[in-house]
Image (cartoon, grey):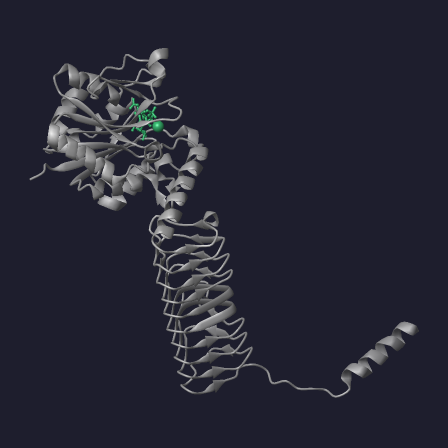
Amino acid sequence: MSRARAAIILAAGQGTRMKSELPKVLHEVGGRAMLDWAIAAAASTGAARTIVVTGAHSPAVGEHVARLFGPGASAIQDPPLGTAHAVRAAEPAMQNFEGDVAILYGDAPFVPPERIEQMFALRTEKGGLVVLGFEARDPTGYGRLLLAADGTVERIVEHKDATGEERAVRMCNSGVLCADARTLFELLAQVKNENAKGEYYLTDVVALARAGGVPTYVVIGVESDTLGVNSKVELAAAEAAFQQRMRIAAMEAGVTLIDPGSVFFSYDTQIAPDVVIEPNVFFGKGVKIAKGARIKAFCHIEGAEIGEGANVGPSARLRPGTKLGPKVKIGNFVEIKNASFGEKAQASHLAYIGDADIGARANLGCGAITCNYDGFDKYRTTIGEDAFIGSDTALVAPVTVGKGAYTGTGSVITKDVPDGALAVARARQHNIEGWADKNRAKKRKDKAT
Ligand code: UD1
Ligand code: CA
């Protein structure tokens, strides 16, 4: 039986380099807050308890955590005096916990759960303390792992405290650490702040562990996984790295991307094989696309389910709550929100369909719109199977158009239309013979005088 696991996520830093009112760890990568990436990684390694250490300066982080886990899942570090001090802030919340704990950072979104799993496994096998290291292309700013001849870690020296020789070392500390919880808190109590920054460094526990006869191991990951975000420039770099991974994963799973670099995904985008995505498409959160669908160029899609063989775009906007059945066709300049389309239903051009249920094979003509909002409340529109909504029809909800019914072009439909009926709701046309010729002659005469 493996030991119980917990995670402590450090998120109390000021994040001043982000130059933002939004706390750093709530900035999103791939549509998910960086903190939530760390929380998800902790959860997928089976952490029974996750404590997020937050700062008094950013209550939004504590509120975010409370929304996810309820109260008690965060600990406040006030003031922030360094990473060791931050972990100690979680000690009261970990009082009755027996087992292993992983320390994660709220600003390092890509540490793969497999890597954390590997660290826990190494601990189970050998005991002691395990850190996650990586070889940095440019190690400036990182703590350096100083390794013994047998590959174990002797100590970690922070960049600011390192000698020239130590700075030449490229093996760096990711910050992720895994230890027996009780041992870790005992070691943390011995950490001092006698260093260049005057902070309590979590990294000092390595040398303290060794001095106390606790072995210290390293698992080596890759730099792109341990990437930390401290500024908007680094946030963009993290986003680019995430998008690149998603594009490759999609193509490897059988999705065709005509121009991969112009397609943007969210962390939860699900696309089946044999879907073709044309250039310049953005997927927000909550998108699921069934096989054989085609997303044409310039679409913005979020919170939408797209059925097998459906065609969307070019230039369509699907908003949250959109459900398209198989072989639905949505054409250019169509916006859909909170609406379902039955099999083979279509809206081929210039339409707004919100809060509606469209029956199978129904056809919405060019310029059809649902008037779903009166400034206070939203109302639904129901269109029966095989109905034909004439071009430029305004459907004033709540309203129902029956199965197989028609609406005349340009109608403003305010009353329900029975099955099989034609509803026409517009002024009748009336022609005045010769009016234009007479009018023109009069105008010309007036100008001449
Ligand atoms: C830290 C490590 C360094 C490692 C680097 C990896 C220490 C002393 N150094 O340095 O070895 O190479 O990360 O990116 O641990 N935080 C708190 N409270 C504090 C200070 C920080 O919660 O008092 C949080 C921050 O919000 C952040 C994380 O801890 O999520 C790391 O802090 P940061 O100041 O960014 O550490 P680095 O200097 O990058
Ligand atoms: Ca950092």
Numbered-mark total: 0
Image position, residue 140 (x, y; %): 39, 21
Check the image and report above or below for 366 versus 47.
below
In the image: residue 242, left or right of residue 442: left
Q: Quadrant of ligand 2?
A: top left
On-image quarter of the N terminus: top left
Image position, residue 418 (x, y; %): 41, 85
Identify the residue at image location x=92%, y=73%.
448
Check the image and report above or below for 356 versus 284.
below
In the image: residue 312, left or right of residue 441: left
- Quarter of the image for residue 403 reads bottom left
- 311 or 60, nearer to the observer: 311
Image position, residue 91 (x, y; %): 17, 29
Identify the residue at image location x=77%, y=84%.
435
- 113 or 369, nearer to the observer: 113
Identify the residue at image location x=16%, y=24%.
185
Is residue 163 visible in the rendered image? The answer is no
Image position, residue 432 (x, y; %): 72, 87
- Quarter of the image for residue 303 reads bottom left
Check the image and report above or below for 237 versus 155.
below
In the image: residue 333, left or right of residue 404: right
Check the image and report above or below for 448 versus 292.
below
Is residue 133 visible in the rendered image? The answer is yes
Residue found at the very far left of the displayed protein: 1
On-image quarter of the C terminus: bottom right
- 387 or 246, nearer to the observer: 246
- Quarter of the image for residue 146 reads top left
Identify the residue at image location x=48%, y=86%.
422
